[in-house]
Image (cartoon, rainbow, N blue to C red):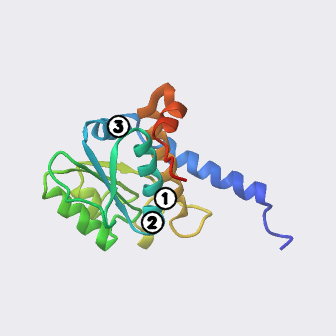
Amino acid sequence: MSDQPDMYTLGKAITLEIGEVVSGVSDASLLEVARAVSASPRIFVFGEGRSGLALRMGAMRLVHLGKLVHVVGDATTPAIQGGDLLIVASGSGETAVTALITEQAGGTGAEVVSFTANRESRIAKAADLVILLRTPAKGGRGEGASIQAGGSLFEQSLLITLDTLFLVLAGDDAQATIERHHANLE
């Protein structure tokens, strides 16, 4: 193990990778997503695996903004309809269930935002707005390289991009906004 990089070096390299990816997201595209979130009466989120977990964290922040948010697949999730917003994430953009849900939502008249590393993917083609996170993805479908395994860079960059979106929407009052809407049954 003595020839392994130390934790500081690895942590710094990971942080730099995330910074590169997040800085590659255009301000204009993130502002378009902010507009869609602001305009939607209800927001639905879906992703599989770690992408889904990152989306759930982003969904929690949208609840902290006072938005009505549902996680697709939960027992209490209602039907999506025109005027609603679906936010999906898949690094490859080809995850079967995510792609199917993206395509189905488009048929309801709901607006769809997809986060992906693959601009040619099913979820990108079926979405109204696409946020491209330039990272490696399964099957060589993404861009760039990473020292990390699997889709880690995509998932971490997704979370940071969603936290950035929250700050854009919350403005200077982010902490007070969280406190007003934070869960109180804990």
Residue that badge 1 annotates: 154
Residue that badge 2 annotates: 137
Front residue (pair 22, 59):
59
Identify which amino acid the numbered label 2 is placed on: Ala
Identify which amino acid the numbered label 3 is placed on: Ala
Residue that badge 3 annotates: 34
Q: What residue sits 45% from the left and 45% below the top?
A: 61
Q: What residue sits 47% from the left and 57% below the top?
A: 54
- From the viewer's perspective, is the residue at label 3 or at label 1 nearer? 3
**Residue 185 percent across, percent down from the top left:** 51, 51
Q: How far is disc 1 from disc 2 in space, using C-alphas? A: 8 Å
Q: How far is disc 3 from disc 1 in space, using C-alphas? A: 20 Å
**Location of residue 47 (image quadrant):** bottom left
Label annotation for residue 71: none
Q: What residue sits 42% from the left and 73% below the top?
A: 139
Identify which amino acid the numbered label 1 is placed on: Phe
